[in-house]
Image (spheres, rainbow, N blue to C red):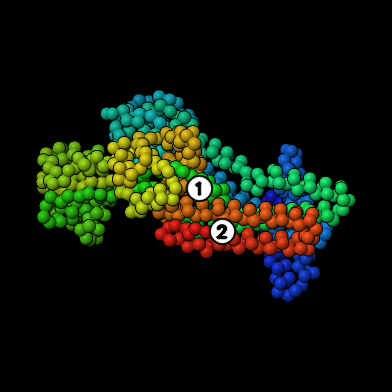
Amino acid sequence: MLTLQKFFANNKRTIVIGMTVFVAAALLLQYAFGLGFISNWLYGAVGVIGLVPLIIKAINSLKFKVVSIELLVSVAVIGALIIGEFSEAGIVTWLFLLGEVIEDATLAKTRSAIKELTELAPQTAWRVESPTDRNAEEVDVDEIDEDDYLLVKTGSQVPVDGRIVFGDGHLDEASVTGEPLPRHKSAEGSDEVFAGTNLTDGTIVVQATKVGEDTVFGKILELVEEAEDSKTGAQRFIDRFSKYYTPVVLLIALIVGIVTQDVRLAITILVLGCPGALVIGVPVSNVAGIGLGARHGVLAKGAQMLQSLSEVDTVVFDKTGTLTTGHPAVVHAQTLSEDVLAWHLAASAERESSHPLAAAIIEYARTTHSIDIANLPAVSETHVIAGKGIVASVEGHHVAIGNEALLAAENIALTTGDNDTNEWKHQGLSLVYVAVDGQLRIIAGIGDALRPTTITALSQLRERGIKHLVMLSGDGQATVDAIAGELGLDEAHGGLLPQDKADFIKQLQTQGRKVAFVGDGINDSPALVAADLGIAMGNGTATAVEISDVVLLNSDISKLPTAYSIARSTVANTRENIGIALATVLFLFIGLFAGFIYMASGMLVHEASILIVVVNALRLLRKKLDGGQVRKN
């Protein structure tokens, strides 16, 4: 039996494709050409082929003392074949295997995410004897111990968690904290760095405090792997239902068979008791709901995800790349001169820089002041001052662009004009000053701007029943408070590492809340898997998208209230179909024992109930969204 089980497992997709062709051919022959005899043979072949894996699963379940629905379906299909109801036998087995193929495909895709995440972990490092030693030795990260000194150059990955003991530079920590702007860190402040982050400029020496699995990045890997294992153990609704339904139907058939000595009647009970409408109605509702979501930019990785989303009462958001665009942009700017020459000169100088804020200055100059980036003044000399900014000579003008420290170094007086730059700082913006020939000309506040649809999306979530909205971020609390105030959130917490976010979600769950987490980065992975439902922005990292339960395509946050409405409608539709299926079975049993339902009429009612649940499920696909809302049934 093991060999047979392996054969069906390894060739399941091919077998289901073949069964689909047989069923389609049988329907065509039966209804288009009236060749019922041939179609019955095709149905029968599908029934026998699909029966084999069902029987194997039923036997395996019985080994663990579980009476699964595969057992009931197997007995019913055998009975249907015996009494000549080939179409019932074929269609039921085909639907069962088709559902398993879809489920297997989802699991395979999820497992690939673990591999991709592991590949991002640092593999080697350059070890030195002391903070000033430059005779570095390349070693495997597994050979690094705590307190070792590691040399990290521009463009390299930090291999451990530790503290900077020499040098300074900007670190891209998006993989751990989600912060889009590189942060300047130095030995002067003994600043902390994390494994998996990248040094975008400068040279530093790090003394290791945590290595390997103990690093923040290592914890992310561990949490994702644990969560994935736990999720694969989830039971489908039909399995839970069969725990009670299957034994009852089998017992009734057995008792009737013994008491009446009527084998055909007992088989009739099994066939009529097989929840055909339930087997078909539940997946069709789910597929229709998933299809409706896909049409509106919402990708749900299975029916259970829609069920979970419909039960959510608390939504927790990551800030960067979720509520905000995730890219630095000029939010406020003040030009202290009457012409736009300063913007031309600033764009020219910044084009020589690779700093992320430089791109924001250039883009603002292009879009706001209509400056032709292709025909900027020539730059004859540039000098990057680490931690301060850039100084350049542009068509005879001395241009300095950077922070307050650069202005002080250039002996340039700092005037803020009419705008209150302290308020910009309170909003968490980075201030960039542009001076030309020793005079301050431009002040720009650069930060991560809110998505245009964020405020509306959060308002719609509240209208549709979400009771609690929370934001968690690795950014400073001042930045988080400013954004939370603008959005009207219930809670907002900053300065959090990935594990902190996951722990906060667990606290919410202990309060009885059903929590969805919305994020986009690798650093969001622990929170995505800790939540009752993980929702990823479609343009986020591949890992976040793969391990999440629901994906908002095109990173459109306005799709979130749409997804919530679709989930609730799908669950309602599924429950309607379950009710129809159970009512049908109850009606058939009552009719059978009351004497007004027989095999032929019972099968007719069965087929009618299947048609009803299919039509009911297809209503979901015809629903239209008015302002992002799904019309009520």
Q: Nearer the viewer, residue 128 or 572?
A: 572
Residue 180 in which image quadrant = top left
**Residue 1 seen in the current view:** no
Q: Is residue 400 above or below residue 292?
A: above
Farthest residue toward the bottom? 33
Query: How many residues crowd around disc 1 within 10 Å: few (fewer than 14), some, or many (20 or more)?
Result: many
What's the amino acid at mark 1? Answer: Leu
User: Residue 432: where, in percent of width, then height?
Assistant: 21, 44
User: Residue 363: where, in percent of width, then height?
Assistant: 26, 54
In-image side of 118 versus 156 (left or right): right
Nearer the N terminus, badge 1 or badge 2? 2
- Cα distance in 3D space between marks 1 and 2: 16 Å
In-image side of 470 versus 242 (left or right): left
What's the amino acid at mark 2? Answer: Ala
In-image side of 352 versus 288 (left or right): left
- The residue to which callout 2 is attached is 288
